[in-house]
Image (cartoon, rainbow, N blue to C red):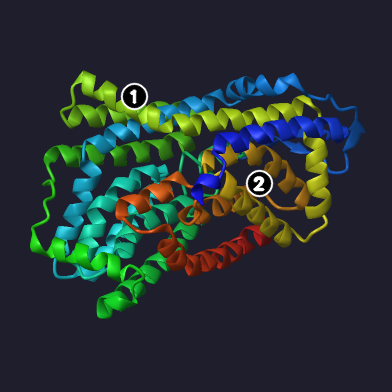
Amino acid sequence: MLKKVPDVFVIVFALIVLAALLTWILPGGKFERRTETVGGHEKEVVIQGSFAYEDSNPQHIQVFVAPLKGFLKLAEIVVFIFLVGGAFFILNETGAIAAGTYQLVRLLKGKELLVIPIVMLFFSFFGAAFGMCEEAMPFALIFVPLALAMGYDSIVGVSMTFLAAGVGFAGAFVNPFTLQIAQGLSGIPLMSGLGYRLVVWFIVTSVTIAWVMVYAVRIRRDPKKSPMYELDRKRREEILEKQQEHSAFTARHGACLLTLLVTIGLMIYGVIVWGWYISEIGGLFFAMGVVSGILAGQGPNKLAQSFIMGVKDMAGAALVVGFAGGILVVLEDGNIMDTILFGMASVTSRMPPMLAADVMYGIQMCLNLFIPSGSTKAALTMPLMAPLADLSGITRQTAVLAYQFGDGFTNMIIPTSGVTVGTLGLAKIPYEKWARWNLPLQVVFVIMALALLVWPVLTGWQ
């Protein structure tokens, strides 16, 4: 089934071609815009009722130039992804996060059930704070055996890490890969709306932890209720026969984790007080990676190799962001961007604001099946969704939240996500068994997302 799904590059380039075809079909058009200052930051907003049709500028051979122009259009974001990806690869190579997590587990020996909320809170926090996603994959090799040894199943082990990081990613309050990119592209201040975002993160994390804990208790009482019972049985026997070896927590690990916490604190302070943007934040994370590597005893060559490996891991995401920018370039050069916006607005602007917000969430959720990359979807959709929010009577902050929900929650079940399929492969969990277990939780996520969009719409959340 997975082999039949087109590669994301095929999808994005097909969208570039489709955009070019639309320039031959749709009439051109323009909205008038004005500049507004909100919280000391200027942004361009669409003036309602100002749309006027114009001639379009049909695109043809430009589809091959569009990706290059897309890179130039979103160059700051592309470089930011490379820097942050390289920095976190260095941090992962130090072993600090793995060692720190295991120490939490050791401290709770004899109180195994408490391991679940503590580890999940840990991973959810880092998913929300710095967008832990791919970084959570290796932890399946630690926590799946640990969960089996504690009498749970491999689904609980994956849920403690991958699921928790995914929920934090969806309900992020800082995440530079999705939230901050989306806010920047929407023309709203970075870190704005932090108070309600913390509430959202706490709610979605708490509900998910409760869901996993109830399931874990049920499985420990009757292992046969697990979809993984037969596959886990042999693995559990092997695990109980031998001592699991884990690296001890060292002073170097502590120094690396402290560096990470200081980095997150500096980022929050820098954005709020010093007005930092993507360039400064990218430089800060790069410094964090270098300092962590030095504290861990890595030499210059090892540091460079780790950074390059991290950049390689992020190359696909960064390339797709550039290609996604090419879609916007074709639509803008073809003079039909505002025509499409007007067409969408003619539907959502006639809806009650609450329904418009829900429709935005639904659009993002559907797109996630084809374009799992959060930063890619931000680059592709937020330049459209932000002004659409102006026309629909909701704030751009609310549109960003709808994007987060639509992007994040379904990442944990869609078969087109390399992280999802890769994590399940490491955990030796067949996709169909995970999907069957995860589907009811996805229904809960949809209900929570719709409910959590109510307050922002009713209050005009900024």
The residue lying toward the viewer, choosing from 251 and 374, is 374
Residue at point 54%, 68% (across, down): 443
CA gap, disc 2 to disc 1?
Answer: 36 Å
Q: Is residue 349 left or right of residue 222?
A: right
Give whichever of discs 2 and 1 has the lower sequence position. Answer: 1
Residue at point 69%, 44% (across, down): 385
Q: Residue furthest bottom?
A: 221
Task: Give x and y (percent) for residue 254.
Answer: 18, 42
Residue at point 34%, 43% (across, down): 135
The residue lying toward the viewer, choosing from 329 and 350, is 329
Task: Give x and y (percent) for residue 314.
Answer: 43, 32
Location of residue 321 by image quarter = top right
Label 2: which residue?
Answer: 396
The residue lying toward the viewer, choosing from 35 and 69, is 69
Label 1: which residue?
Answer: 308
Residue at point 42%, 46% (across, down): 419
Measured along the vertical axis of the image, is residue 131 above or below residue 228?
above
Disc 2 packing (10 Å; few <14; some 14–19; many ≥20): many
Q: Nearer the viewer, mark 2 or mark 1?
A: 1
Task: Give x and y (percent) for residue 437.
Answer: 43, 67
Measured along the vertical axis of the image, is residue 232 above or below residue 84?
below
Q: Is residue 261 left or right of residue 359?
A: left
Q: Which numbered marker is on residue 449?
A: none
Measured along the vertical axis of the image, is residue 384 above or below residue 152?
above
Residue 314 in view, yes or no: yes
Q: Which amino acid type is shown beneath numbered disc 2?
A: Arg
Task: Give x and y (percent) for residue 380.
Answer: 63, 37
Q: Which amino acid type is shown beneath numbered disc 1?
A: Ile
